[in-house]
Image: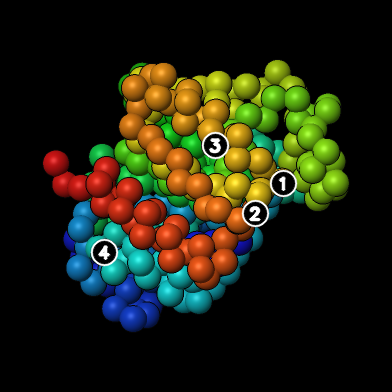
Amino acid sequence: MLRLLCVLLLVSAARAVDKVAIRPDVVYGHKDGLALTFDVLSPAKPNGAAVLFMVSGGWYSTWADPVKVAPVMKPLTDKGFTVLLVRHGSAPKYTVPEAVADVRRCVRFVHLHAKDYGVDANRLGVMGGSAGGHLSLVLGTTGDDGDAKSKDDLLKQSSRVAAVVAYYPPTDLRGWQNDPPEAIKKRPDLKPQLTFDEKLAAGVSPLTQASSDDAPSLMISGDRDELVPIDHSRKMVAALKEKNVPCDLLVIEGAGHGFNAKHNQIVVPAMVGWFEKYLAKK
């Protein structure tokens, strides 16, 4: 899953790897007695923008040593982006709407504590592949300005992001609870997280949430993807264009649900370029 892809934090928890300072296991919330965490990868020469990477495949969110993940994020950190590796409550225990709530909380947390990580809260990007791409697009299409009347400082914060890159994302989950596509039916590991009230499906389907204030979004999909057909991305781009939201679809010919090293020679520069364009300092 993780292969898919301003100041150094001089604290006791930080570890330096190839001029990137790593601050692991920042707690952004709790649920059922469990901590919700992300890791911070801070480049030596930060540009003030951050990219939140959704650690999610099939809405499973697993831990990996950030020291080993840091080289995968090198194309971003080399350009000065601070990268946050965001984990959510994982399947099979938690469903898709619960994962959405977690990552939305994380964005609010980053808005509240942005200065702690040397980043501008108005220059947050988000990315991921498959379920991670879905979560990224949900964040990009459903951001709000927070509740100014809340007594909770976190809930007062915005959940908006400024740019999205989503690899082969499912964009419409309606019907997946009771009558999912055949490709999904063949994946019993996906059933627990899709077992939620169908009335909630539209709210976690980016396709139904497109509006004029959405974040500029780049989708990258293979034209031979059988698990999440490219039509998910095509329809999402059409919906965003209808609302005059900057968006694009990069089609990787011959690719299925995942990219190889050759594909990444096209994918990675496009991803970095999108964030450079839309997270540039105003």
In the image, what residue occupies the spot 36% across and 60% down?
A: 269
Say which quarter of the image contains residue 82: bottom left
Foreground pick, 113 / 181: 181
Q: Amino acid at mark 4?
A: Lys
The Cα atoms of the two marked residues, 3 and 2, are separated by: 13 Å
Give percent across and percent down for residue 179.
83, 28
**Mark 2 to mark 4 CA distance (whole Å):** 28 Å
2 vs 4, front mark? 2
Task: Assess disc 4: are there few (<14), some (14-19) or many (≥20) residues with their C-alpha within 10 Å of its C-alpha.
Answer: some
The kind of secondary structure element at disc 3 is helix
Could you say which disc has been placed on residue 256 in the image? 2
Which residue position is annotated with label 4? 79
Quick check: marks 3 and 2 in contact, CB under 8 Å?
no
Which circle's residue, 3 or 2, is located before the other in the chain? 3
Secondary structure beneath label 4:
loop
How far across and down, in percent of the image, does residue 130 sit?
Answer: 60, 48
Tell me whether circle 1 and circle 2 mark residues in contact (CB < 8 Å). Answer: yes
Residue to which mark 3 is pinned:
233
Q: Earlier in the sequence, mark 2 or mark 4?
A: 4
Q: Is residue 216 left or right of residue 37?
A: left
Question: In the image, is 55 to the left or to the right of 189?
Answer: left
Mark pair 1, 2: CA separation: 7 Å
Res. 226 mark: 1
Label whose residue precedes the other's in the sequence (3 or 1):
1
Give the structural element (helix, strand or loop) at label 1.
Answer: loop
Find residue 241 and report its image quarter. Answer: top left
Name the secondary structure under disc 2: loop
